[in-house]
Amino acid sequence: GAVVSQHPSWVICKSGTSVKIECRSLDFQATTMFWYRQFPKQSLMLMATSNEGSKATYEQGVEKDKFLINHASLTLSTLTVTSAHPEDSSFYICSARVTQTYEQYFGPGTRLTVT
Amino acid sequence: SQQGEEDPQALSIQEGENATMNCSYKTSINNLQWYRQNSGRGLVHLILIRSNEREKHSGRLRVTLDTSKKSSSLLITASRAADTASYFCATARSGGSNYKLTFGKGTLLTVNP
C-alpha cells in the first residue's frame, strides 16, 4: 500500500510555543490530505481537510487560527499548532487520499505533549 | 454525530478462533473502509468496500456490506496474537470535493495466545 510519513513522531513543548507537524505522501501524489486528532482510547476526530493549492476546510469547532494548515505541494501538508496549551496535548494523525480509488492512507501519528 | 458505530466495543478470543466485528451507520454512503490501529500507532488500511459491493476478501479478512440495513461486518479468520489491535470502520458519505471519512468508536480486539 501507499506510504505516508509524519514528522516528528513525538514532541514536547512548553505552553505558548508553536509546533509544526509535517505529513508527506512518499510514493504517490495527494491532492487531498486530512488531519485528525485522537484522544486516548477514543476514535479519530477529523479536524480539517487540506487541499493542495487552496485553503483548508475546517470542521465545526476547530479553530483555524490555532491549527494552521498548509498544503504547499502534492506530497506535503503541514499542521502548525500555534500558542499551544496543555489541552492541545493529543495524538495527531494525518492521512492522504488516493484520488482515483478513495482509499486513505494514514501516517504513524505525532504525539504532542504541551507542558 | 459520528457516522459509524462498532459493535462490540471489546472482544477477547483465543488464537485460532474467528473474530467478527460489526459496524452500523446512519446515512447513505459512497464507501466504507476498515482500519486497524495498534496501540499508540497510526492506522493501517485493511479493506475498502463500495456501496454497490456486498462482500470483499483480503487474505484472512472478509468484509460484508448490507446497505439496506446500513451495516457492515469484518471477519478475521484463524486469528493470531498479532491481530490484537483496535479496529475501526469509517464511512464516506459522498465522493468528489466533499469527500471525507467519519470514524466509528472502534472495537478493541484481544487475541490470547
Image (spheres, coloured by chain):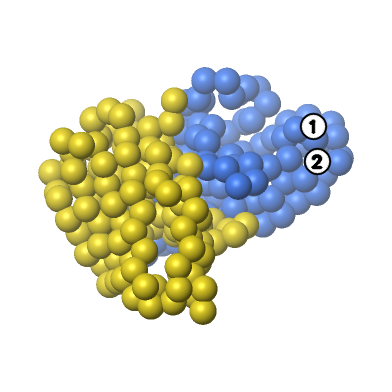
Relative horizontal placement of residue A68, taking residue A53 as reference (left or right)? right
Quadrant of image for the N terminus of chain A? bottom left
Residue A114 is marked as 2
Of residues B1 and A30, the one drawn nearer to the viewer in this rendering = B1
- Specify the quadrant of the image occupied by residue A36: top right
Q: Residues within 10 Å of mark 1 (few under 14, many from 20)?
A: some
Q: What amino acid type should be assigned to the residue bearing mark 2?
A: Val
Color of chain B here?
Answer: yellow
Q: Residues within 10 Å of mark 2 (few under 14, many from 20)?
A: some
Give the x, y percent position of residue A81. 69, 35
> Which residue occupies 79% across, 32% down?
A85
Give the answer, above or below, for where A81 lies relative to B8. above
Residue A96 is marked as none
Task: Tell me the distance, in whole angstroms, between the alpha carbons under discs 2 and 1.
Answer: 6 Å
Give the x, y percent position of residue A54. 45, 29
Q: Chain of mark 2?
A: A
